[in-house]
């Protein structure tokens, strides 16, 4: 796997309130009680039918890569390369953007299965670790 | 038509490019404004209001410009819609003219980027996409990879957009880059966000462009008998929150922006003779033209490679050279597109003239918002 990869997060707090749960690791979205559409991050309205009442929803941790890129140039302060992907969660019919690790950039493929993993997104002013999310290739791939 | 058209009395630009750090944003704006006012034969005293589009210019950049230009005291407003800022300023001026608030409005799009932006542009740090490492090039790269897989298009066809637009720019004295490039150069360029390389990306640029817009009374004030090109309408939409696992390149936001353009202008897609399209990246020109309905879904890359969208083709796109060649000082781009449309519709575009151009469209897309299919999209429709 890429040497620049940071370790999975084990403690701390979500880097945005309401975005994810730490134990067990889950992304938190919203689901419409009317039409069933799921949104991530959670929204106060249903973006699909616009009329239904929405409820909190824990999302599936199993995804697949719908599209991806290997970012080779980024503004100063961002280490490259890294793999950024549109990840589909088929069980929830949710598509979200996240980094993918555990696979060398040249080995990433469309439809590759990936699993949710929490990771550090930095440190708060009070020293607490801020926990974010990424996805890891389900099947170990030679880096 | 819902609102009265705005007459374009004058346009002007400073050449886009990389200027030294001590060339101030205000100086570039003044350069473009004076060109546009001279083109209109207008004195400063004739100008009722100033509309300024910019992103990185800082607080009250428009008023700083007005104080140096000699428009101090007038109503001045600053408009930020990321890369659609200049076009948004034009829309607000058009609305003010149609509402009877002004008869002569000056619009300036301006940006000084090279001394304050490095490595590419990205969303606001508060946006969730920024937190996961999103940069604009990455979004377009993922669009391109999906387009290749879904439509059987080739990398070479996408690269053809850059070759085409740089070939056009040879004839544009206002363009940052005026040299033709080869397909091999595009394919062999340093990778930025795979599959896109350096020559698939518009540059970080400095520049300014200005437009004098008038009501019929304003034209009389300026002593202009001939009406010249008109802005019939400027559509503005924002992205919608997406759900489901649909086509990543559906470009519904472009479809809606197109519908706004046709609704506001009374012009239809079949009437359009040329397009200035926001080609911040090669693939963006392709999917946005498809979203507007001006190119069949999945055919945009092939059309670029076959020359359909080149000068001399059935529907020329970016005769100016587009953002890829003219440069992309983000707040200035929308105003520069209207300068190009004006020259094309006057028949004064020289070696890049689209023969017989009577109606034209300019499209800008500005910014991204997590979970949506875009920030802002503007569509300017003009006729000769």
Image (cartoon, helix red, strand yellow):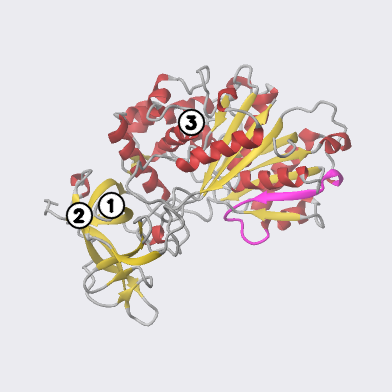
Is residue B320 visible to the viewer in this orientation of the structure? no
* Label at residue A114: 2
CA distance for labels 2 and 3:
35 Å
Picture coordinates of residue B85, whole percent (x, y): 60, 48
| Residue situated in front as seen by the camera: B35 or B232 | B232
Ranked by sequence position, the earlier of labels 2 and 1 is 1
Task: Say which quarter of the image contains residue B231.
Answer: top right
Please give the residue where the numbered disc 3 appears in the rendered image.
B293
Q: To which quarter of the image does residue B320 belong?
A: top right
Q: Chain of mark 2?
A: A
Q: Is B283 situated above or below B347?
A: below
The foreground one among B217 and A38 is A38
Q: Nearer the viewer, mark 2 or mark 3?
A: 3
**Crowding at mark 1 (Cα within 10 Å: few <14, some 14-19, many 20+):** many
**Marks 2 and 1: same chain?**
yes
Question: The N terminus of chain B lies in which quarter of the figure?
Answer: top right
Q: Are marks 2 and 1 in contact (CB under 8 Å)?
A: yes
Question: Which range of residues does the magenta coloring cover?
Answer: B45-60
Indicate yes or no whether the magenta region holds residue B51.
Answer: yes
Q: Is residue B289 above or below residue B209?
A: above
| Disc 3 chain ID | B
Q: Depth check: A21 or B50 in front?
A: A21
Residue farthest toward the front in the current orientation of the protein: A34
The residues bearing labels 2 and 1 have C-alpha atoms spaced at a distance of: 8 Å
Of tags 3 and 1, the one toward the viewer is 3
Quadrant showing the C terminus of chain B: top right
* Tag 3 secondary structure: loop
Residue B283: image x %, image y %? Answer: 40, 36
The answer for which chain carries disc 1 is A
* B210 in the magenta segment: no
Q: Is residue A98 left or right of residue A24?
A: right
């Amino acid at each position: 796997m890429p040497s620049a990869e940071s370790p999975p997060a084990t403690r701390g707090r979500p880097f945005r309130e309401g975005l994810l749960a730490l134990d067990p690791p889950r992304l938190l979205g919203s689901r419409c009680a009317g039409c069933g559409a799921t949104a991530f991050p959670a929204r106060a309205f249903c973006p699909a039918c616009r009329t239904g009442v929405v409820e909190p929803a824990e999302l599936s941790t199993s995804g697949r890569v719908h599209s991806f890129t290997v970012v080779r140039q980024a503004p100063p302060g961002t280490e490259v390369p890294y793999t950024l992907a549109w990840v589909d969660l088929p069980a929830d019919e949710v598509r979200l953007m996240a980094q993918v690790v555990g696979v060398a950039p040249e080995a990433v493929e469309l439809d590759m299965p990936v699993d949710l993993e929490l990771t550090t997104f930095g440190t708060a002013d009070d020293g607490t670790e801020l926990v974010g999310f990424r996805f890891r290739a389900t099947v170990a791939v030679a880096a | 038509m819902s609102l009265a058209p705005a007459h374009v009395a004058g346009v002007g630009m400073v050449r886009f490019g990389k200027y030294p750090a001590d060339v101030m944003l205000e100086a570039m704006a003044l350069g473009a404004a004076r060109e546009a006012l001279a083109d209109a034969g207008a004195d400063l005293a004739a100008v009722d209001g100033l509309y300024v589009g910019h992103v990185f210019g800082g607080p009250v950049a428009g008023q700083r410009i007005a104080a140096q230009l000699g428009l101090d005291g007038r109503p001045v407003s600053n408009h930020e819609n990321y890369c659609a800022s200049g076009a948004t300023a034009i829309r607000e001026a058009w609305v003010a003219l149609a509402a009877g608030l002004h008869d002569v409005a000056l619009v300036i799009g301006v940006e000084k980027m090279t001394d304050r932006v490095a490595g590419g542009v990205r969303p606001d740090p508060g946006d969730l996409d920024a937190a996961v490492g999103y940069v604009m090039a990455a979004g377009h790269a993922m669009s391109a990879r999906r387009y290749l897989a879904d439509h059987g298009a080739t990398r070479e066809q996408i690269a053809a957009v850059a070759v085409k637009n740089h070939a056009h720019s040879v004839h544009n004295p206002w363009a940052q880059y005026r040299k033709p490039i080869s397909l091999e150069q595009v394919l062999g360029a340093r990778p930025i966000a795979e599959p896109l390389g350096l020559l698939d990306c518009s540059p970080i640029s400095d520049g300014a462009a200005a437009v004098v817009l008038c009501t019929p009374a304003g034209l009389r004030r300026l002593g202009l008998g001939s009406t010249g090109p008109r802005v019939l309408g400027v559509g503005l939409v924002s992205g919608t929150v997406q759900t489901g696992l649909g086509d990543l390149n559906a470009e519904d936001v472009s479809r809606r922006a197109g519908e706004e353009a046709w609704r506001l202008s009374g012009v239809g897609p079949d009437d359009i003779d040329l397009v200035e399209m926001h080609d911040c990246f090669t693939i963006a020109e392709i999917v946005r033209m498809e979203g507007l309905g001006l190119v069949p879904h999945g055919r945009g890359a092939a059309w670029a490679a076959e020359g359909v969208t080149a000068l001399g083709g059935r529907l020329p796109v970016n005769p100016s050279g587009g953002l890829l060649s003219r440069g992309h000082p983000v707040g200035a781009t929308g105003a520069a597109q209207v300068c190009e449309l004006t020259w094309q519709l006057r028949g004064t575009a020289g070696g890049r003239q689209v023969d017989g151009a009577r109606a034209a469209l300019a499209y800008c897309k500005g910014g991204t918002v997590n979970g949506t299919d875009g920030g802002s999209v503007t569509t300017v429709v003009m006729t000769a």
